[in-house]
Every structure is written in C-alpha cells, then in structure tokens.
Amino acid sequence: MPAESPRSPSIAIIGTGFGGLGMAATLKRAGFDDIVLFEKSDAVGGVWRDNEYPGAACDVPSHLYSYSFAPKADWTRRFAEQAEILEYLNECADTFDIRRHVRFGTEVLGAAYDDAAGEWELTLSTGDTHRAAVFIPATGQLSRPSYPSIPGLDEFAGTVFHSSTWDHDYEFEGKRIAVIGTGASAVQFVPHVAERSDRLELFQRSAPHVIPKPDYPYKRRVIDGFKRIPGLLRASRMATYAWLEPRALAFNQSWAAPVMNAVEWNFRRVLAQQIDDPVLREKLTPTDAIGCKRILMSNDYYPALNRPNVDVVTEGIERIESTGVVTADGELHEVDAIVLGTGFAATDFLAPMTITGRGGADLNDEWRDGAHAYLGITVPQFPNMFMLYGPNTNLSHNSIVFMLESQFAYVKDAVRELRRRNLKSVEVRADVESDHNAHVQQLLGETVWATGCDGWYTTADGKNTQNWPGFTFAYRSATRRFDVAAYRALSAGRIAAKR
C-alpha cells in the first residue's frame, strides 16, 4: 500500500485583528484549512474595532498599513481613519473566506499543552474546550486597556470611560470634562472633545512630542491612477517603506543626534508657531529626549489646547472625589465626566490568559522578569506556540504590518515543516532563545529608549519588552525561513510510542 501522506496539523488562532486575520489568510493561501479563530467580540477587527473614539486614525500611511497580498487602491486618505481600516479588515475577512473559521463571542481563558498528545487544549468562555496541534495567540500588544490606579476613581459620581470603550451616547455639550493622559489616543480625541464641551481640563503627567501629520485626502484622479496604472500602487508602498525605514537610525544613540536634533528643532518651531502663551508652551515642552517615548502626529492637537475653554493641568493627581479630580496642590477640579486616555497594558503579553506549557511550565513564571521570545514568536517549554506581535517586535519608525507579514511567513514555514516531517511538535531551544534575547537587550541598551524615560515600552523594572532595536529588513531576514535547527523537534512516532 502507498504510504499515507502527512496530515495537516490543526491550528487555533486567538484574535481577528491584523495579526489573526493575516495569519489565517496566509495559512489558507498555503493550503491549510483546519483552522479555528477565537474572537471574544461579535465582529472582526481587533483594536480597529474597539478603538472607535472620535479622531481615531493610523499614523502609518495607508498603502503600507495594509497587507502586501491584499493591496487596496482606493484608500481615501494618505493616513486612513479608523472606520476605513475596519472596513478593509472586514473586506479581507470576506475575500479570504475567513469568517467561517471564526467562533465569535468566544474568549480563550487559558491554554494548556498536553505532553502525551502533543496538542494544546484551550479553555473557552463558553464552558467548552478546544484542541489543536498549533496554537497561535494573535492578541497584540494594545488589546487590554490600562486603567490608572488613582484613589477614588470608583467613587466618582459622574461618567467615566476609557478611550477604547468610548461612550457614544454621552453628550459633551455644556459639560465640564477631565481627560487623563496625553498619549497617542488622547492627542487624537482631545480636539473633538474640546470643540464640543463647555470646559476641558487635560491632566498631563509628561508632555509628548507632537509633530505635524503629512496627511491629505487622495484626489479622485490619484485613486484612479492607483487602480489602473500597473505597478503604481506597489511603487507607492515601496516608496513609503523607503521613506520610513531609515528612521530606525534615529533611535540608535550613535546615529540619533543629527537626525533627532533636526526633528527636535522642527518640533519646537511648530510648537512656537501654534502656542502663543509662553506658560502653556512651557507646559507642552517635553523633558524627555525626543524618541524616548512615542513621537505623535497631529495637526489639530496644539490648536485645540489654545482654545479658551481648555486648560492643561500639570499638577499630579492625588485622588478623585465624587465631584471631580483633586491635584497635589489640594485644588478640586469639578467635572461632569472623566475620559481616560491612559493607553494599554502593553507589557502584559497574553494576559489575562493562563498559559501552561510542557511539563506544567507556567508562562507567567517564565516571564516574571519581563516577557521574552525567540524572534518575538516562540518560547522554550511551549511547543507549537507561535505568538504574533510578541515581545520586542514593536516599531517606532515603520509599519507593524510589515513585521507581522514576516511572522506570517515564519509561522507558515513552521507549520509546513510539521506537516512535511510528520512532527508532533517543535520547541525552540532554551540556549537559542536566551542568546537571541540577550542580543536584543544589548542592542536596546544602545538606543534612545535606554536613556531613562518612563513609558509603555518598559516594564516597572525598566526592561524594554516591546521594541525591535533595528531595521525591519533585518527582522525579515531573520525570519525568512523556519530555522528548524534552532528547535527541539519531536516526531509523531515518538509521541505515539509514549502513549
């Protein structure tokens, strides 16, 4: 009898944002169909589904903030807004026939590796379990809102909501609003709140660098050109990549000075042009080195802070009472609503799931000193688990979608290897992962992020678990193929013999 062909492994993916949808599309295009995606919401889209606050938009040009295998010629703006990005993700889910693989309204509470079977068992919010040979968490770094631990927040008598759970029924007109936080989300929604509210007090812990956003709507004839002229859309994508990629040098301390000095000069010029009041301008002047925290882009943030109904408060918040916010100087700022622009728990990778690997290894214990993974994808003692947008794969200079596509190719190659060699599992060797992580941390020590600033890139102990410390093409080269020699491979026959 002819030998039985290797069976394709079953695959479980968590999340339906850019990571989950793109991974599923890549696997399906490679001929894999035994795929289940788990989505806790009732729709696809990830952060672009959840973050629908006014002004929500991307800070990477549209042609590069999209899949290379699913180009979109008719983006309406150079920098797409939330609704259009969400529409694009829905279109991709339909184009690649992904919805039939999704179990909506199903949150994965935990996952445990079954050593004997060589499978992952997922515990679901529905009370069921699901087994799969390959486990791909695609929950991202910005999926869990970060709520500040301010005394009395729960005692506030007015309305409180986070930017990622925007209350669209709340009427700002005639109201006094407190906004806590001045990060990427706040910079986008503050102008809209300022325009609609009677009074806005913006509580700022540290001033961000906000530079002009080179955004504009595409004219009809330009969109038609992207549609009709062969290669023009691809050329735009390549040109955008070439424009952004050299910026990686600006975050390395050896190269940063000439580049960042120019950016800093331009920032201060724009700040002086847009903020007339010297007292306010002083409040809005950052004390951190430029690039140490995320550089933000906006054309309406500073003009909004110039409005007579807006006040920037730099006194620290001591507590919150039923009627408002009390600052360290003892002043009570009475408000009707508090909007939290406090970002996300980015360093808490895969939380709040409980992940148990080979031999009962607890991922929380493995990451007690900060998350780490080989190429940001695999962790020793967790066979057949491939993270997307994992530790140290975030970017400050280019499109995360480019990084994700590098990971898609690597994971696809790994799954192919499991099928080709009839393997039950592959697990990255501890020495390989340790050497990689040590190298990444060494390189991070040479960047502007190591100059002492306190931001969402670092853990409470100061370890940078977020950023990739170099060029994206270097990462793509490192992930161009699944390097099986870096892994401990276990054949199906050996597992069967242990049963």
Image (cartoon, helix red, strand yellow):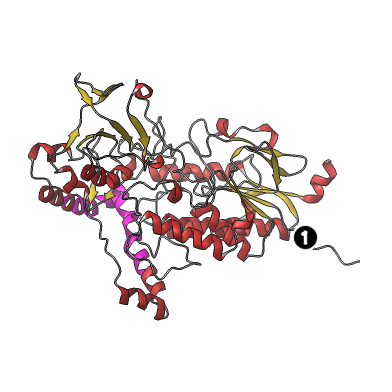
Q: Amino acid at mark 1?
A: Pro
- Residue 200 vertical position relative to residue 394 in the rendered view, above or below: above
Residue 45 rendering spot, x and y as whole percentages: 48, 52
Q: Quadrant of residue 278?
A: top left
In this view, the residue farthest toward the right is 1
Identity of the residue drawn at 29% across and 45% down? 189
Residue 20 rendering spot, x and y as whole percentages: 55, 53
Q: Closest to the observer: 456 or 461?
A: 456
Q: Closest to the observer: 483 or 495?
A: 495
Q: Is residue 67 magenta?
A: no
Identity of the residue drawn at 58% across and 35% down? 363
Asked if residue 347 lies left or right of residue 353, the reply is left
Give the overall secondary structure of the magenta segment: helix
Identity of the residue drawn at 70% across and 48% down? 133
Give the residue pinned by disc 1: 6
- Residue 388 vertical position relative to residue 158 in the rendered view, above or below: below
Asked if residue 297 lies left or right of residue 358, the reply is left
Asked if residue 169 lies left or right of residue 32, the reply is left
Identity of the residue drawn at 46% across and 42% down? 143
Q: Closest to the observer: 184 or 387?
A: 184
Q: Which span is picked out in magenta?
A: 239-265
Name the image quarter holding the C terminus: top right
Q: Quadrant of residue 60?
A: bottom left
Q: Is residue 264 magenta?
A: yes
Crowding at dot 1, Cα within 10 Å, few <14 / some 14-19 / many 20+, comes out as: few
Name the image quarter holding the N terminus: bottom right
Q: Closest to the observer: 452 or 391?
A: 391
Residue 413 rendering spot, x and y as whole percentages: 62, 59
Q: Secondary structure at mark 1?
A: loop
